[in-house]
Image: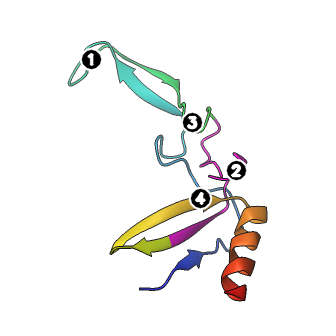
Amino acid sequence: MQDYCIFGAMRSPIPCIACGGLGRIETSRYGGNDPDTWLIRCTSCDGSGHERCCECGQDAVDAWIEDADGKPQVYPLCAEHMNAYVAAANDA
């Protein structure tokens, strides 16, 4: 399978995978079915709710997907780095 990329039509930020775009996650003292829960800021997106570019840390708007040994690898990228990856792929 070839490498390919996903382009967002409106180029809006990708929701954070860790918190589902909420910017916060629920935690508890004991885990499991503990009724004593509270919300904390998501450390993956630093509370923004947006996935971060794997190159520079800005909000990612696209994803570059590479198929390595039958397992897709997803790299969230900002618009600048996405354009650089596409240009490099077209030159190759």
Q: Are marks 3 and 1 in contact (CB under 8 Å)?
A: no
- Residue 49 in magenta? yes
Q: Which residue is mark 2?
A: 59
Looking at marks 3 and 2 on the same chain, the residue that comes earlier in the sequence is marked by: 3
Give me the disc on residue 35: 1
- Residue 83 in magenta? no
Looking at marks 4 and 3 on the same chain, the residue that comes earlier in the sequence is marked by: 3
Q: Report the residue at 75% width, 79% height from top.
A: 87
What is the secondary structure assignment of the residue under circle 1? loop
Task: Measure the C-alpha gap from mark 3 to mark 1.
Answer: 21 Å
Q: Are marks 3 and 2 in contact (CB under 8 Å)?
A: no
Q: Report the residue at 46% width, 42% height from top.
A: 18
Looking at marks 3 and 1 on the same chain, the residue that comes earlier in the sequence is marked by: 3
**Which of 91 and 41 lies nearest the eye of the viewer?**
91
Q: Which residue is mark 4?
A: 76
Q: Which residue is mark 3?
A: 23
The quadrant in which the N terminus is found is: bottom left
**Mark 3 surroundings: few (<14), some (14-19) or many (≥20) residues within 10 A:** many
Q: Is residue 79 left or right of residue 53?
A: right
What is the secondary structure assignment of the residue under circle 4? strand
Q: Report the residue at 69% width, 60% height from top.
A: 12
Query: What amino acid does circle 2 point to?
Result: Asp
* Span colored in magenta: 48-65
Query: What amino acid does circle 4 point to?
Result: Pro
What is the secondary structure assignment of the residue under circle 2? loop
SS majority, magenta: loop
What is the secondary structure assignment of the residue under circle 3? loop
**Mark 2 surroundings: few (<14), some (14-19) or many (≥20) residues within 10 A:** many
